[in-house]
Each structure stands twice: as structure tokens, then as C-alpha cells.
Image: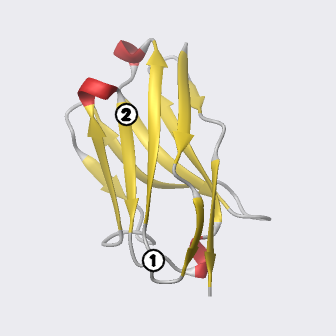
């Protein structure tokens, strides 16, 4: 089992920045990738960024160049630095941990971008 706890969401004006954090605990040695997703009202959950055990990062086109995923291995924490935020970035943001046998999700953190 892997437990994930997100933090760092909130209300920000368009053009502003936020940094989300996701602390992992439990069977972290089984994690082969960590990712950030978001889900806006009435929309499907979408993958924004991921980082694997080698440190390779991938981004969705919608956030490439504005969002950066990183990790602190010593603290078992993954971050999502979000810059130049837009109202359409408003959503609940979720952390995901992928293992070979299961996917684990955090509880989500709300990000609201006002125009």
C-alpha cells in the first residue's frame, strides 16, 4: 500500500504561481512513477506530468513550459510547480503513484484561478 497526501492548493489570480506537494509513505519502494493529474467539473481526469524512477519527466501539451514536476527523494515528496496559471487550470489536482500491481491516489487539492 502507498499513501499519498497532497498540499499546496488554493486560490490564485491569473498569471500567478502555485507549488503543489505530494508526500508518499508506505511501500514507496514499489513506486515506479509518480504523476500529477487534474479533474475539472464535468471533465475527465487528465494526466499533466509524470516522473519515473530514473527521473525522466513527461508533460501534457496543455502544461508544457508552464508546469514543472520534480521530486525530493530523501523526503519521498513530489512537487508540481505551476506558473502562468490560467482560469482554465481551475480543477482538483491529484497525485498518483504507479506500481506494477496498482495505482494509488491522493485525496486531491483544489486549485482555483481567478480571472
Q: Which mark is residue 16?
A: 1
Residue 2's place in the image compared with 7, above or below, is above
Residue 24 in the image, given as x and y percentages of width and height: 45, 26
User: Label 2: how many residues lie within 10 Å, few (<14), some (14-19) or many (20+)?
Assistant: some
Residue 31's place in the image compared with 77, above or below, is above
Extreme residue toward the right, this view: 42
Looking at the image, residue 111 sits to the left or right of residue 55; the answer is right
Residue 11 in the image, given as x and y percentages of width and height: 61, 68
Looking at the image, residue 91 sits to the left or right of residue 27; the answer is right
Residue 4's place in the image compared with 18, above or below, is above
Q: Residue at x 44, y 11 (%)?
A: 27
* Residue identifier under label 2: 77
Given residues 12 and 83, the one toward you in this image is 12
Query: Which of the 4 image quarters holds residue 105?
Result: top right
Q: Residue at x 42, y 63 (%)?
A: 60
Q: Residue at x 48, y 48 (%)?
A: 36
Given residues 72 and 40, the one toward you in this image is 72
Of the numbered discs 1 and 2, the one sitting upstream in the chain is: 1
User: Label 1: how many residues lie within 10 Å, few (<14), some (14-19) or many (20+)?
Assistant: some
Looking at the image, residue 89 sits to the left or right of residue 50; the answer is right
Extreme residue toward the bottom, this view: 115
Mark 1 → mark 2, Cα distance in angstroms: 23 Å
Q: Residue at x 22, y 44 (%)?
A: 56
Q: Secondary structure at mark 2?
A: strand
| CB atoms of marks 1 and 2 within 8 Å | no
Nearer mark to the viewer, of 1 and 2: 1
Count the marks: 2
Indicate the quadrant containing the N terminus: top left, top right, bottom left or bottom right. top right
Indicate the quadrant containing the C terminus: top left, top right, bottom left or bottom right. bottom right
Residue 46 in the image, given as x and y percentages of width and height: 58, 56
Q: Secondary structure at mark 1?
A: loop
Amino acid at each position: 500500500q502507498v499513501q499519498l497526501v497532497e498540499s499546496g492548493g488554493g486560490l490564485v489570480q491569473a498569471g500567478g504561481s502555485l507549488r503543489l506537494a505530494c508526500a508518499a509513505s508506505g511501500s514507496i519502494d514499489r513506486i515506479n512513477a509518480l504523476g500529477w493529474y487534474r479533474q475539472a467539473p464535468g471533465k475527465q481526469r487528465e494526466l499533466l506530468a509524470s516522473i519515473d524512477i530514473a527521473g525522466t519527466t513527461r508533460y501534457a501539451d496543455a502544461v508544457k513550459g508552464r508546469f514543472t514536476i520534480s521530486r525530493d527523494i530523501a523526503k519521498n515528496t513530489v512537487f508540481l510547480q505551476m506558473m502562468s496559471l490560467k482560469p482554465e487550470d481551475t480543477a482538483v489536482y491529484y497525485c498518483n503513484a504507479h506500481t506494477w500491481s496498482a495505482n494509488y491516489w491522493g485525496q486531491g487539492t483544489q486549485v482555483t484561478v481567478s480571472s
